Amino acid sequence: MKISRLSVFVQPTIFVGCAIILTFALTAILAPFIAGDPLSFDPLNRLKKPSELFLFGTDQLGRDLYSRVVYGARVSLIVGLSVALIATTIGLVLGIICGYLERVDAIVMRVMDGMMAIPSILLAIALITLMKASLLIVIVAIAIPEIPRVVRLVRSVVLSVKTLPYIEAAIASGTKTRRVMTRHILPSTIPPLIVQATYVCASAILTEAGLSFLGAGTPPEIPSWGNLISGGRAFFQISPWIIFFPGLMLAITVLAINLIGDGMRDSLDPRIAKRI
Amino acid sequence: MQSLSLTSISPQLPPPILRIDGLTTEFYTPSGNVCAVNRLSLNLEQKETLCLVGESGCGKSVTALSLMRLIPEKQGGITSGSIHFEDEDLATASESTMRRIRGNKISMIFQEPMTSLNPVITVGDQISESLRIHQKLSPRQATKIAIDMLALVRIADPARRALEYPHQLSGGMRQRVMIAIALACEPAVLIADEPTTALDVTIQAQILELILELKESVMTSVLLITHDLGVVAEVGQRIAVMYAGRKVEEGPVKDVFDQPFHPYTQGLLESIPRRGASSRVGQCRGQLPEIPGFVPSIRETSVGCAFAARCKKASPQCGIAAPELTAQSTGRAVACWHPNFD
């Protein structure tokens, strides 16, 4: 058991993915020490090319792009992690209940089907028009449409596990329904759920950037990568670096998370692991 | 058959531990209800080993699942009859009553030791689980008893094995663990549903011996479900033969084996390969007799005897009405219009 647990981290894809994400996370945490004020204007240094003084150049208001990209990592990582956490937690609970209790299943799954029909961008626009734009609203708006996907995944695992003889054996030895669900069924749902969580995280980061780009996401005063790209759009032809650097960071982050997800899938699913 | 050392049961017996009365279990299908167990009456006496035998699909396992009330509500259930156990009628008992009884007073050993253990929980924890549920023991006490149970089912180095996962054990050891789980709370009744089917022949004998030995030390009654008449001859005290959801014959194992009343029991016994059988009258050399035909599907409802179509002795009467189970000499009963009394 110990060897197989270790081998998860020996997988090169997971190693590379984790290294990138850890670097970004450290950068985000240490932002005040390694970058300047992302909001300070400098009208004399507008639209400057990347140089030694301004590592990533400056934007149309003379703000240091490097500082803004570093602070933007905070928003992306917070959104990605929170959405993954919220969606998988709620999805796990609902999925196990739905898969195990058939009476609840019919009702909850119809609600889930309904939720799946709502695009996250539309929901976010609706929520932000109703309430004041904030990071929390963005996280909630992105998390809600992700929940049904997690529920479906967990439910399918539960449905296949609950017919196994050891579940019947557990019931035959007098185990309570709640305990059967938590102790005997829940552990089987964790490996696919971890993999799904990484995909939810990556897609949440992209959705957040998309929403910010459309102006329906993170408030413009917060330097998120989506906001940076949105702001630099008008100057794309004369100073492409404004959208190049945040776009590049976005791509690397999502790639790294997907690398972790793929690696996890390969090492957690014994059938695929054998083929490799 | 002379090697059997079985004693006939004396007529004076304490009340049976489990009394099944007219149990009918039906499954709900789109084309109507299908009767898997039909008005089955069966007594399990205290500290006896009762064998329930029959072909696949004759309702043995469904009987076991009915006793434990483990048939999913949506698929089917007990439609009539009663199961008396310690002042309770298990046929109508509430789910919480059943939970208190399952694994505590009535335990079950399943056919598949490979899949009946949870792969992600150590075997020690799986044994201690029912102790913690039913006897409210502390984790430490439960673990201690779990290790004792592993030693009792003769697993070497029980303290180390208790920390292992099911995939680290062999099939025979897993079945031993299942037995340890089933007997951990010292149940009054142990239902063993083909406990040796999935095991090697050499292991089968060990497991059976173990069940019988523990039966004595834990003072439990065993309902052994099997299709292996060799097993019955070895371990059973009484035998009940089922056919198409009904009990067709019942009696002490030795008596039934010596003189089967029902043509079906007779057919079953004749189809066991045995030394010297080829010299029997009317049989080709080296050919094993078989019962012609198949078990009728439980969807087909017949007014007559379900075995009539395959029976050598069938008469017009057999097609008209189903024979009722009638008591014969000491402890024997048969449901047949033409029982073999010669």
Image: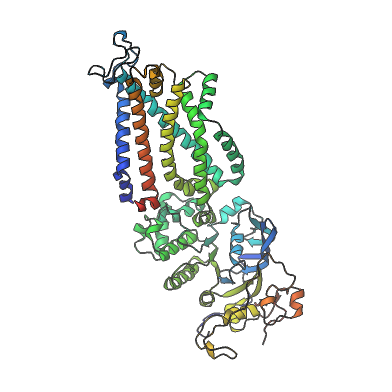
A230 relative to B100 in the view: left or right: left
- Left or right placement of residue B25 versus residue B119 in this view: right
Instruction: Identify which residue is drawn at 40% across, 49% down.
Output: A269
Q: Would residue B243 appear left or right of B237 to someone viewing this image?
A: right
Q: Can residue A222 be seen by looking at this rendering?
A: no
Image x and y of residue A95, in percent: 52, 42
Is residue A238 shown above or below A27? above
Residue at image point 36% right, 50% down: A273
Q: Is residue B26 visible?
A: yes
Q: Residue at x 41, y 32 (%)?
A: A81
Q: Position of residue B289 (x, y in %)?
A: 57, 82
Task: Compare residues B263 and B41 and report the one nearer the observer.
Answer: B263
Q: Position of residue B209 (x, y in %)?
A: 46, 72
What is the basis of the colouring in this image?
A: rainbow
In the displayed structure, A74 sits above or below A42; it is: below
Farthest residue, direction top: A44
Which residue occupies the foreground of this view, A46 or A118?
A46
Q: Quadrant of residue B340?
A: bottom right
Q: Total number of numbered labels?
A: 0
Q: Position of residue A200 (x, y in %)?
A: 44, 35
Q: Is residue B151 above or below residue B136?
A: below
Q: Between residue B109 and residue B147, name the one nearer to us.
A: B109
Q: Residue visible at 59% across and 71% down?
A: B55
Taking the view exactly as shown, the residue that stands out farthest to the left is A52
Residue furthest to the front in view is A237
